[in-house]
Amino acid sequence: MKINDSTYSTIEQFAQVARQYCAWADGNLGETQEEVRRAGRLLAELHLAALRLPDLGPGEDRGAVRIPQDEWLLMYQKFGKLPLASYWDVFNPLEAEGPILNDLADDLADIYRDVKSGLSLFESQHLIEAAWDWRLNFQIHWGRHLVGAQRAIHEYLSKEGL
C-alpha cells in the first residue's frame, strides 16, 4: 500500500511525540511536581496524536521489538519516584464496576513499552505496521493507562494549585 503525504505526515507526527515521551522517560527524571506536569503535557500530546493515526490495516506481518520485562521494571521504578503514586479509578466506566487502585508508575511504564515498541517498526521504515501497532495497542491497552493517568495528573495538579 502506498502512503500519501498527508498520511505519512500524521504517522510522522505521532512518531515525533512518541520519541519525545520515550526521551523524557529515558532521561533523568526529577522527583518533582514539574515532572508530573511534563508527563501530563506529553500524555495529552500522545492522546491527540493517537486519535489522528490512520487506520491502514495491519500491513505485513512484522513483529515490533518488544521491551523486555527488566527494562519495563527499570521504567516502573523510575516513574515510582514521582510525587504522585497511586490513585483511584474506574477501569471501565461503561460497566458497573467499583473503583480500583491504580498505579501511575505502571501506567507510564506500560505506555512507554507500547509506544517504544511501535517506534522500532517506524524506525525500520515499516510505517503501516507502526501505525497499526500504535492504534491497536492504544485501543486495547495503553489508551486505558493514558486516560487514567491523565485524569489522576489533572486532579493532582489541580489540588496542588499548579
Image: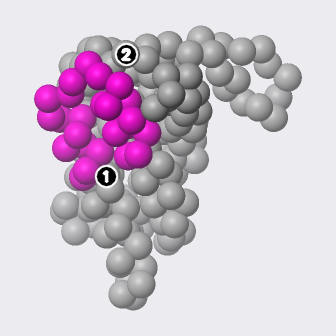
In the picture of the structure, the residue carrying the numbered disc 2 is: 83
What x and y, as percent, mark residue 62? Answer: 31, 56
Q: Please state if 72 lies on the left or on the right of 50 as rendered.
A: left
> Which mark lies nearer to you, 1 or 2?
2
Residue drawn at 72 percent across, 15 percent down: 99
Label 2 environment density (alpha carbons within 10 Å; few <14, some 14–19, many ≥20): some
The N terminus - image quarter: bottom left
Residue 83, relative to residue 56: is it above or below? above
The reply to whether the magenta stretch includes residue 55 is no
Q: Residue furthest front?
A: 161
Magenta stretch secondary structure, dominant: helix
Residue drawn at 79 percent across, 19 percent down: 97
Q: Please state if 103 lies on the left or on the right of 61 as rendered.
A: right
Between 81 and 111, the one lying in front of the other is: 81
Residue drawn at 55 percent across, 60 percent down: 51
In the image, the segment drawn in magenta is 19-42
In the picture of the structure, the residue carrying the numbered disc 1 is: 18
Q: Please state if 92 lies on the left or on the right of 47 as rendered.
A: right
